């Protein structure tokens, strides 16, 4: 009866500890084939290790309690079977399994017959992600801090860096892969269920490393095609006078020297800058500043006015010299760019 | 004689020390020092302070990115004024008497009050603004 209670308590504690393991960003909550293999692998190591630990402790207890029996057993037998044979067999099996897992999680390998993977280029920089989709017909669409992918299809992510080493990690989809200046690494991911999951830079890259996150949005295949088609369009042209004023203020404030808004490439204040994220469809993104703030007119105004306070050391200056009407009209304009 | 003096001394002490506690900083504490405004969370018709707190904590409208708000993790913005003691303020944003209706209006659409304010209409609904106002009225201490 006592034992039951203890077991219950242990299970409850374990459940509590594991409650943190599901959700938007969780190694133990796989949403695709590669992460599923990795989770299986982790569980095997965990339970295998736990069993061996329990067995070792049992042996120790036997050695301490049944001294007669241990005296009669020749020690050499224990050493040969448990000290040599068991580890050799176990470690060999694990080596083979590890090699197999390594191949299984490499989704880019040996599927030449099937649907070609979607190619997405991700360029890391302090402290955000530039994301470029290849539509397969030679066209590209650039956005930022969000990876939209179709479910059930492989996505080949080409990873590069513009400054220091970063690391691309979506725990629910795959392991980590570094972004190294001067070279391109590739990782192939696949999501099996639609939904939003979170990824994050996993290699310390500077002051705001912790605020360099992104979201992966997995769509059903048709929804993804629609999404991509919409993103291929240039920015929405404002009609309401309020938003027209916002667009004018956006350009006059010089935002376009660091940001692209496709459709605003003409004129003295063109929005063609390459330093910051593409804002063509910024209003439809889930977050601002690589997961720093949720998206919306309020957070947009806050970010424009005080980017250095909200994410000190990032490359965008605070624009609190803008008069307050200009600030809010730019925020409303950007919010309308869906 | 000395024995009899003890209770009197103790009573005197406890009376002297009664002034040392901070007293509950609750909404109902309308006796004693009456707040400048008579703002009262209960007076925000239909507002629910707990829900308002959840709206602020969710961060959806960016309130915490512009304002420091007591009791809300991560609400440390410095674009606008800190919202400490909103329950004691005489005016909302220095423009409107601090009544529940005015506070809700301001939160929902500051541009109605003054189109030149740096605080944008964030898209918050009237119901959410009502809950947020109820929460802000629970803030009754200065930093």
Image (tube, rainbow, N blue to C red):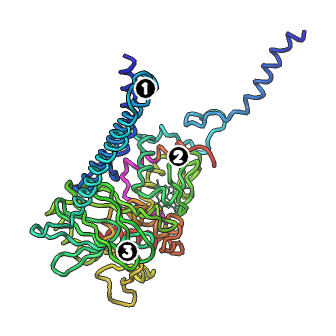
Residue A229 vs residue A154, the one in the foreground: A154
The answer to the question of whether label 3 and label 1 lie on touching residues, with beta carbons closer than 8 A, is no
**For the view shown, which residue lies furthest in the right direction?**
B1
> In front: A42, or B142?
A42
Tag in front: 3 or 1:
1
Q: Are marks 2 and 1 in contact (CB under 8 Å)?
A: no
Q: Residues within 10 Å of mark 3 (few under 14, many from 20)?
A: many
Is circle 2 on the same chain as circle 3? no
Circle 3 is placed at which residue position?
Answer: A277
Magenta segment = B117-132
User: Does residue A116 show up magenta in the picture?
Assistant: no
Residue carrying label 2: B71
Q: Secondary structure at mark 1?
A: helix
User: Residue at (29%, 80%) from the top-left corner?
Assistant: A262
| The label number, if any, that marks residue A305 in the structure image | none
- Name the image quarter holding residue A215: bottom left
Which of these two is toward me, A100 or B126?
A100
Q: Which residue is mark 1?
A: A71
For marks 2 and 3, give the one nearer the viewer: 3
- Viewer can see residue A103: yes
- Quadrant of the image containing the N terminus of chain A: top left
| Residue A239 visible to the viewer | no
In the shown orientation, is residue B122 left or right of residue B80? left
* Residue at the extreme left of the image, as rendered: A113
């Amino acid at each position: 009866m006592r034992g039951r209670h203890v077991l219950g308590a242990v299970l409850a504690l374990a459940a509590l500890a594991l409650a943190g393991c599901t959700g938007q960003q969780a190694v133990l909550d796989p949403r695709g084939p590669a992460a599923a293999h990795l989770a299986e692998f982790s569980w095997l190591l965990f339970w295998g290790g736990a069993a061996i630990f329990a067995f070792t402790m049992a042996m120790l207890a036997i050695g301490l309690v049944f001294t007669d029996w241990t005296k009669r057993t020749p020690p050499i037998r224990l050493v040969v079977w448990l000290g040599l044979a068991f580890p050799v067999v176990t470690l060999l099996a694990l080596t083979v399994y590890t090699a197999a897992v390594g191949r299984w999680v490499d989704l880019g390998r040996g599927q030449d017959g099937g649907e070609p993977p979607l190619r997405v280029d991700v360029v890391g920089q302090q402290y955000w992600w530039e994301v470029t989709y290849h539509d397969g017909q030679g066209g590209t669409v650039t956005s930022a801090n969000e990876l939209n992918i179709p479910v059930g299809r492989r996505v080949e992510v080409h990873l590069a860096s513009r400054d220091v080493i970063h690391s691309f990690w979506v725990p629910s989809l795959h392991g980590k892969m570094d972004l190294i200046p001067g070279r391109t690494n590739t990782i192939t991911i696949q999501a099996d269920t639609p939904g939003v999951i979170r990824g994050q830079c996993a290699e310390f890259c500077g002051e705001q490393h912790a605020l360099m996150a992104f979201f992966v949005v997995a769509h059903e295949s048709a929804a993804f095609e629609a999404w991509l088609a919409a993103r291929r369009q240039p920015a929405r042209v404002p009609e309401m006078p309020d938003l027209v004023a916002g667009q004018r203020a956006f350009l006059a404030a010089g935002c376009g020297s660091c940001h692209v808004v496709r459709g605003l490439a003409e004129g003295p204040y063109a929005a063609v800058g390459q330093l910051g994220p593409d804002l063509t469809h910024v209003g439809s993104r889930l977050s601002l500043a690589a997961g720093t703030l949720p998206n919306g007119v309020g957070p947009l105004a806050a970010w424009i006015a005080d980017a250095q306070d909200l994410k000190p050391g990032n490359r965008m200056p605070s624009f609190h010299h803008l008069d307050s009407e200009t600030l809010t009209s730019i925020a409303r304009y950007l919010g309308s760019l869906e | 004689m000395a024995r009899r003096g003890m209770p009197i001394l103790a009573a005197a002490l406890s009376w002297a020390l009664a002034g040392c506690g901070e007293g509950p900083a609750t909404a109902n504490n309308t006796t004693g020092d009456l707040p400048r405004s008579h703002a009262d969370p209960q007076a925000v018709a239909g507002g629910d302070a707990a829900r308002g707190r959840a709206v602020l904590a969710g961060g959806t409208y960016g309130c915490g990115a512009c304002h420091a708000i007591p009791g809300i993790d991560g609400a440390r913005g410095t674009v606008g004024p800190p919202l400490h003691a909103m329950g004691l303020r005489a005016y909302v944003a220095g423009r409107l008497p601090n009544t529940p209706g005015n506070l809700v209006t301001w939160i929902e659409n500051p541009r109605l009050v003054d189109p030149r304010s740096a605080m944008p209409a964030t898209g918050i609904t009237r119901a959410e603004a009502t809950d947020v106002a109820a929460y802000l009225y629970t803030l009754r201490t200065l930093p």
